[in-house]
Amino acid sequence: MIWLEDVAVGDTARFGHHRVERDEVIAFATRYDPQPFHLSDEAAAATHFGRLSASGWHTGSMTMAMIVEHYRATGFQSLGSPGIDELRWLKPVYPGDTLRCETEVLEVRRSASRPDMGLIVSLLTVYNQDDVAVMRFRPTLMIWARSAG
């Protein structure tokens, strides 16, 4: 189990493994982001993407799945998140890519109004199989404290 008291500024983690499948790229885009370059190679070929690419929102969803799996594996006492800052899609994500995550803790603090929990600010970067950063953001995480202070 990982509680607030177990986390320190500078802590890092590498986790996740998600292979991006063509069918899921098209299915996600069809439902949530039906821009042509997310739906067909032909449409994407006429853009800067060059070929079918995953929606940035799909990349975020795949990342979230890797985060939750990491939390389950480590026992991270997550209470969700009030939001993220500085979301950037740095490079396209293509079918056949394999994604992974790296995170670094930037800030840890106990909640003043809820001393049984705390807040963690980190920098999370998603990489493809070539170690090219494809997405980066600064999430604020809420986590249970082992004790109320």
Image (cartoon, grey):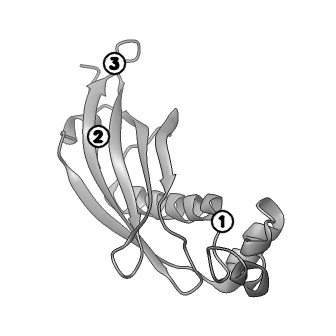
Residue that label 2 marks:
3
| Labelled pair 2, 1 in contact (Cβ < 8 Å) | no
Query: Residue 72 placed where, x, y %?
Result: 42, 59
Mark 1 vs mark 3, CA separation in Å: 38 Å
Residue 59 locus on image (x, y percent): 57, 64
On the image, which quarter does residue 102 sit in? bottom left
Mark 2 to mark 1 CA distance (whole Å): 33 Å
Quarter of the rendering occupied by the C terminus: top left
Q: Nearer the viewer, residue 21 or 45?
A: 45
Q: Select label 2 or label 1 by which is in front.
A: 1
Residue 40 x %, y % = 77, 82
Q: Is 113 above or below relative to 55?
A: above
Going from the N terminus, do you reach mark 2 or mark 3 first?
2
Q: Which mark is residue 83?
A: none
At a point 31% along the width and 54% down the height, the residue shown is 103
- Label 3 SS: loop
Q: Is residue 24 left or right of residue 39?
A: left
Horizontally, residue 130 falls left or right of residue 64, namely left
Q: Is residue 50 above or below residue 16?
A: below
Residue 81, visible in the rendered structure: no
The earlier-in-sequence mark between 1 and 3 is: 1
Three-letter code, disc 3: Pro
**Image height of 1 relative to 100, above or below:** above
